[in-house]
Image: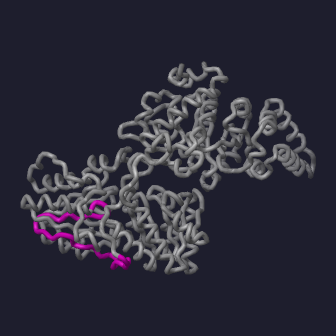
């Protein structure tokens, strides 16, 4: 009989005997593996926190007590235990469950998060809200060891430790090799030092020692160090103790005999407490244990073997960009690459393999990454910062203050620009055009295809100032590649097709959708021009104004927010050039956070396919749109027809 099927809320879990928890955890793992193998998702991290999640929901009174999951991509067990098991097959699908915690989805989800490092600060805000409102519930934050590289995590710990309020932080450590401390003796010590008797004795002894004139504080410090020696983990314990936290651990995060009593004790302790647990990423699924990096955020896979369910027919834009970077780095030893804990995701593994001394992974520290790059550039190197668009947002001030004000030659490779599908709201790259184009000295580029991408990589590395090149998630188009990349003239777009009725001005992956729409419009007698802008900034104002003067309608297309983005730049140019006799329409992402869903579906919903562009033009020119038809291969940008125009 299934245990999991009987659990519809944490109240049901409390009626399960702890000796059944191992069997329950096995069921949970099977459910997670089955769902993720079908739809993709974060597998390794979720398999590693099954026991911890069960223990927390068993001991806490949620949703009154609050659990904050840092990043929250490890919350699948949490969802299964809080009334969402029957919807779990919809995970990360359009209209389905989010792959992260989402307050709109459940009262058990206390905070929306998709970026690491936010958990401690958010949870401590809840602690202070509890104190202000005179409430009594508990607040627990679960943070991974990777997030300890985030400055924001340390800022939150520093603040919480200084104020001394009741607060439990659980450090879920799945990287450190300290197996000698994970066992019966360590667990016994952790259970002992978190017990009520020990806690009272520790507090009273500390107060007594502190009263000894002149030397009391020194003796207190010696006592703390002796305690850490007994635990066998001097350095991590001292770090957190100095930040004002009582430290306990490490304990085995998969052993309920250790986990339950220790958690029960630390939840009774007063003041800030940090519990250090050791877990194994991917536990329960051999392929994920062998390759936790790939299974961190994986596409659908064959459950029996762990191999991807589908193999991409063409290389991704990421692979094209990084291949170009490696080739350029062979020619110029000043080129170095920087990433923030996303070496695999940004495709820098090939660069690291060939140039291990020229690759810097700074951890989850995007702000440091950008200012570090500024320092490298100030001394004559050519740093390349490879980052997802959603993560570059975290270093906005550093881009402005540390790079652009000094006009330093830092190249930003902005991966996952535009719609990114199932990761949803927190991960869509919607804002980079808008927040970069208003920064003085910054050049903002986006290629129409992979051939133009390699030329933009060359341009970025040759340009003597801050510059960005933005490319999408997904496979490339399969166009013919020039043998040698060359520099593009800064701020110069290209007229792909001329026309006298309508001008479609597009940037990035939207260009070929515009070309398909223009082809259909022209077949219907609407003479349509298409401009590949190439540059959001500096925009080719001469080309834009010249084409606009020859037509009656101008439509702009971008896979980014309409407010302040590429379309806004075109409208500003038309106003400055005195081109007022044209009707205009801006196509892009609306002023709300975009939901999760396949890229093709989202592009269709927001009118960014060839069909959507065609329909928008027909509406603008006052001709009733015809019934929607299916463009063969145009809904997916990876299946556009190949022609001579696609080469640069």
User: Which quadrant, please, contains the N terminus?
Assistant: top right
Q: In which quarter of the image is residue 430?
A: bottom left
322 relative to 355 in the view: left or right = left
Q: Eyeballing the image, is 460 above or below 510?
A: below
Q: Can residue 195 be seen in this view?
A: yes
Q: Where is residue 234 in the image (x, y as percent from the top left)?
A: 80, 50
Q: Residue at x 49, y 40 (%)?
A: 304
Q: In which quarter of the image is residue 586?
A: bottom left
In front here: 24 or 149? 24
Q: Tell me if residue 487 is in the magenta stretch.
A: yes
Secondary structure character of the magenta stretch overall: loop
Q: Give the range drawn in magenta.
A: 483-510
User: Which quadrant, please, contains the C terminus?
Assistant: bottom left
Q: Eyeballing the image, is 459 above or below 83?
A: below
Q: Position of residue 633 (x, y in %)?
A: 24, 54
Q: Which residue is drawn at 77% across and 52% down?
A: 235
Q: In which quarter of the image is residue 11?
A: top right
Q: Eyeballing the image, is 323 above or below 635?
A: below
Q: How many marks?
A: 0
Query: In the orientation shown, which residue stands out farthest toward the left?
Result: 525
Q: Tell me if residue 410 is in the magenta stretch.
A: no
In front here: 580 or 99? 99
């Amino acid at each position: 009989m299934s245990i999991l099927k009987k659990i519809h809320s944490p109240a049901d879990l409390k009626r399960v005997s702890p000796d059944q928890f191992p069997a329950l955890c096995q069921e949970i793992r099977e459910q997670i593996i089955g769902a993720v193998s079908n739809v993709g998702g974060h597998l390794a991290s979720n398999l590693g926190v099954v026991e911890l999640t069960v223990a927390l929901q068993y001991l806490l009174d949620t949703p009154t007590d609050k659990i904050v999951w840092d990043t929250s991509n490890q919350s699948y067990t949490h969802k299964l235990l809080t009334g969402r098991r029957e919807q779990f097959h919809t995970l990360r699908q359009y209209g389905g469950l989010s792959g992260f915690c989402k307050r709109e989805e459940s009262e058990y989800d206390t905070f929306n998060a998709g970026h690491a490092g936010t958990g401690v600060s958010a949870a401590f805000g809840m602690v202070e809200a509890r104190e202000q409102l005179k409430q009594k519930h508990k607040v627990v934050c679960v943070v991974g060891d990777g997030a300890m590289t985030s400055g924001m995590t340390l800022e939150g710990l520093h603040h919480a430790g200084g104020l001394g309020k009741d607060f439990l932080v659980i450090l879920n450590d799945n990287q450190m090799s300290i197996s000698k401390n994970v066992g019966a003796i360590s667990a016994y010590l952790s259970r002992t030092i978190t017990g009520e008797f020990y806690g009272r004795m520790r507090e009273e002894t500390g107060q007594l020692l502190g009263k000894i004139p002149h030397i009391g504080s020194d003796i207190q410090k010696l006592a703390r160090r002796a305690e850490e020696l007994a635990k066998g983990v001097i350095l991590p314990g001292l770090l957190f103790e100095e930040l004002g936290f009582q430290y306990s651990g490490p304990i085995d995060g998969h052993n309920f005999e250790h986990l339950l009593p220790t958690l029960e004790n630390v939840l009774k302790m007063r003041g800030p407490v940090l519990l250090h647990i050791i877990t194994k990423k991917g536990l329960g699924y051999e392929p994920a244990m062998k390759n936790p990096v790939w299974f961190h955020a994986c596409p659908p896979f064959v459950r029996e073997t762990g191999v991807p369910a589908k193999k991409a027919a063409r290389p991704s834009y990421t692979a094209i960009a990084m291949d170009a970077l490696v080739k350029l780095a062979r020619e110029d030893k000043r080129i170095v690459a920087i990433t923030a804990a996303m070496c695999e995701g940004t495709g820098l593994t090939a660069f690291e393999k060939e140039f291990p001394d020229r690759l810097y992974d700074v951890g989850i520290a995007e702000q440091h990454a950008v200012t570090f790059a500024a320092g490298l550039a100030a001394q004559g190197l050519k740093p390349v910062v490879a980052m997802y668009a959603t993560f570059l947002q975290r270093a906005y001030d550093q881009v402005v203050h540390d790079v652009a004000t000094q006009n330093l030659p830092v190249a930003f490779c902005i991966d996952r620009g535009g719609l990114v599908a199932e990761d949803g709201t927190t991960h869509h790259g919607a804002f980079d055009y808008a927040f970069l184009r208003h920064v003085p000295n910054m050049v903002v580029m986006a290629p129409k295809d992979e051939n133009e991408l390699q030329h933009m990589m060359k341009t970025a590395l040759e340009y003597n100032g801050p510059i960005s090149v933005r490319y999408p998630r997904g496979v490339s188009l399969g166009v013919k590649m020039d043998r040698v990349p060359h520099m593009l003239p800064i701020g110069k777009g290209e007229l792909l097709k001329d026309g006298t009725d309508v001008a479609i001005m597009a940037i990035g992956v939207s260009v070929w959708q515009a070309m398909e729409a223009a082809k259909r419009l022209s077949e219907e007698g609407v003479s349509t021009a298409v401009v590949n802008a190439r540059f959001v900034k500096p925009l080719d104002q001469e080309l834009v104004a010249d084409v606009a003067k020859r037509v009656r309608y101008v439509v702009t297309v971008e896979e980014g927010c309409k407010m302040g983005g590429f379309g806004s730049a075109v409208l500003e140019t038309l106003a400055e050039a005195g081109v007022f006799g044209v009707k205009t329409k801006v196509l892009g992402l609306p002023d709300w956070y975009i939901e999760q869903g396949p890229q093709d579906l989202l592009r269709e919903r927001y009118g960014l396919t060839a069909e959507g562009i065609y329909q928008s033009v027909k509406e603008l020119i006052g001709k009733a749109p015809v019934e929607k038809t299916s463009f063969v291969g145009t809904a997916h940008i990876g299946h556009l027809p190949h022609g001579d125009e696609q080469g640069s």
